[in-house]
Image: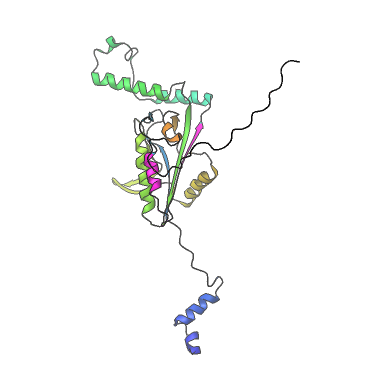
Amino acid sequence: MSWRAVLDPRTEVFREWMRMSLPGGGTPTPRSRKPELNAELKLAGPPYEPLQAHLIVGADPLQPFARTFERLSDELEERATICVDLRAVPNARARWIRQFWLGKARGNVVKGELAEPETTQGLPVGQVVTRRQDTSRLNDKLNPREVLFEVQILIHTESLDPARPVEIFRSFLTGFQQWKGANELTVHGQLVTLIGHDVRFFGADAFAWRRWWFWYRLRHGLFWPASPGLVTAWELAGLLKPWTVWNTSTAPVRGGPCRDAPAPRLRERARGG
């Protein structure tokens, strides 16, 4: 090989020599950022509207999520995280919240209209049933005997395939539809519309500072929901419980019988004396 071929910038030999001579030469080119998706869920309706409750008998509401985790591909380096955080509302603040949202509830009820059947004879049946249902929902959600919780739900998905993070997230979002009742869980963000057409959705990935704030809460466990949401324990009991025998997925790690020896009992002091 002549020296002209080495010094000529148009040759592949010269380009290889320059690549090896530069700082960090010979190291593989760093891979681009793995496609990912971050999203936060919130209550779609007013906080006084309840979610669908689960009896957790004969079926496991965690089954759809387990199926999605089971389909994650190791070859595509797929990862997914669902973080559900609850924080109990203090009694004094819960009392104020109940009074505030009871005042915001829609509709007017005449005294005795829902309790005495004889006073509802002049009203349409549908109106009477609707008002009784509204009263029942308000009593279930804002009952002073129920403990109120603030909720924060963070979802993260990633994959080498650019289309897979959205697909995995939609599968998780479908699983959350089990809780759709008078209220439901939806994605938090701002939808920009122009002349009746959706232009862009600004969610947790819209800006760099939003992504940083999402990851800071997810990694460090900071409880700071973007939208205030109130739930009771019975509303999200299906998410807080462990896997049950009705979950047929192979994704959950199931523990067998306890193999650890029981802790030794402390010696009791002799009484009397």
Q: Residue furthest top?
A: 118
**Residue 72 belongs to magenta span:** yes
Residue 202 visible in the snapshot? no
Q: Nearer the viewer, residue 127 or 237?
A: 237
The answer to whether residue 109 is left or right of residue 23 is: left
The residue located at (49%, 23%) in the rendering is 95
Relative image position of residue 267 (x, y in whole percent): 68, 26
Q: Nearer the viewer, residue 166 or 116?
A: 166
The residue located at (37%, 50%) in the rendering is 166
The residue located at (49%, 85%) in the rendering is 6
Q: Residue furthest right?
A: 273
**Residue 54 belongs to magenta span:** no
**Magenta part of the chain:** 63-87
Image position of 42 with respect to 57: above or below:
below
Q: Nearer the viewer, residue 27 or 185?
A: 27
Q: How many marks?
A: 0
